[in-house]
Image (cartoon, rainbow, N blue to C red):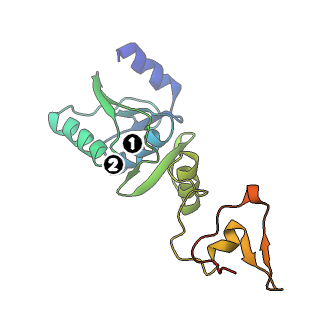
Amino acid sequence: MKRLDLDILLQEGEGSMLEYKESFSASFARELVALANSAGGKILLGVRDDGTVKGIPDSNEQRARIQDIARNCDPPVKVLVQRVGEVTVVTVRESDAKPVQCSDGFYWRQGAVTQKLSRDEIRDFFRSEGGIRFDLSLCPRPSPMPSCIVTGSWRGPTSSWRSIPTGLRSPAPADCPRG
């Protein structure tokens, strides 16, 4: 990234893919996760919310800390750390293994704001990203209903065998009563 690219980002203002951080803070992991769960983006360390450059010292310790935080996300977040003038630019790749979480939970970007996902939003996120397919999930507790009712062969109230048309059922399992 060049100085001209940074100037463009500073004029653009914060948004769904751009976050300004005046200093390195505890919320950094949440910002990483939110961008990884969205479309990716950049975090500009050393920039105030109004877009003015405050600057932040560059050190190997700070770069290592950024990489450690990214690696400790689950799954790890891929980042590129660059220095442009007095600003540290952290480029966050969109995760190909969403959703990503940090120790504080699951986050995503909504416009220029990082939001924590609620329980229902997490479930929907897993479903939309293909992490869980509820139609193919195993039931965590045994069903009180014999599987013959599910498969289509069952004894009705008149004690005669009833069945669903052959093309719509599978063979009766072992827990079904036999006549």
- Judged left or right of residue 98, residue 175 is right
Q: Position of residue 25 (x, y in %)?
A: 32, 48
What residue type is disc 2 on?
Answer: Cys
The extreme front residue here reads 179
Task: Identify the mark nearer the N-term, 1 or 2.
Answer: 1
Q: Quadrant of the C terminus?
A: bottom right
Relative height, residue 128 to residue 174 (above, below): above
Q: Are marks 1 and 2 in contact (CB under 8 Å)?
A: yes
Question: Is residue 113 rendered to the left or right of residue 21?
Answer: right
Residue located beneath label 1 in the image: 32
Name the residue located 59 percent from the left edge and 70 percent from the top edge. 173
| Residue 155 visible in the shown view | yes
Tell me the amino acid under the disc marked 1. Leu
The crowd level at tag 1 (other Cα within 10 Å; few <14, some 14-19, many 20+) is: many
Q: How many marks?
A: 2
Identify residue for label 2. 73
